Amino acid sequence: MSSTEIRERISISPNKRFGRPCVKGTRIAVEDVLVWLASGMSNGDIVKDFPELKKEDILACLAYAAQRERLHRFVS
């Protein structure tokens, strides 16, 4: 997923969830999605529990986290 595609689905607003990155149009933080995936929830489980999310939103959360990790490696 490209940086442009990530920006189309993930936003950061200081007035929403204390500035945490969230799926656009929701108050669902990238961190929430990552925790759900790490706990064993599938993409389908997440979409079933949170129908405002699409599979592409979940993939954008993963891509966002991977991008942050790559950037962090160069900053450290």
Image: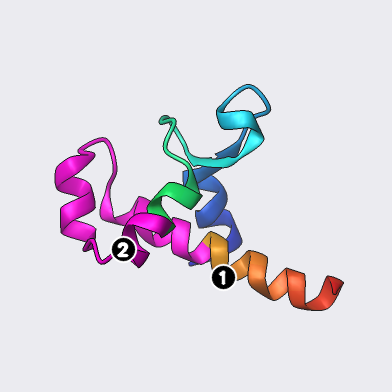
For residue 25: magenta?
no
Residue beneath the point at 75% across and 70% down:
72
Q: Does residue 69 appear left or right of residue 34 in this picture?
A: right
What is the x, y in percent for residue 38? 36, 66
Q: Residues within 10 Å of mark 1 (few under 14, many from 20)?
A: few
Note whether 15 is above or below 44 in the view shown: above
Q: Nearer the viewer, residue 4 or 46?
A: 46
Residue beneath the point at 29% across and 42% down:
53
Amino acid type shown at disc 1: Ala
For residue 37: magenta?
yes
Residue 39 image label: 2
User: Dividing the image into 4 quarters, which one contains the C terminus?
Assistant: bottom right
What is the x, y in percent for residue 69? 65, 71
Circle nearer the viewer, 1 or 2:
2
Note whether 75 is above or below 16 in the view shown: below
> For the residue labelled by badge 2, is the local secondary structure a helix, a strand or a loop?
loop
Residue beneath the point at 74% across and 70% down:
71
Q: Does residue 31 appear left or right of residue 56 in this picture?
A: right
Question: What residue is shown with label 1?
Answer: 66
Q: Which residues are magenta?
A: 35-63
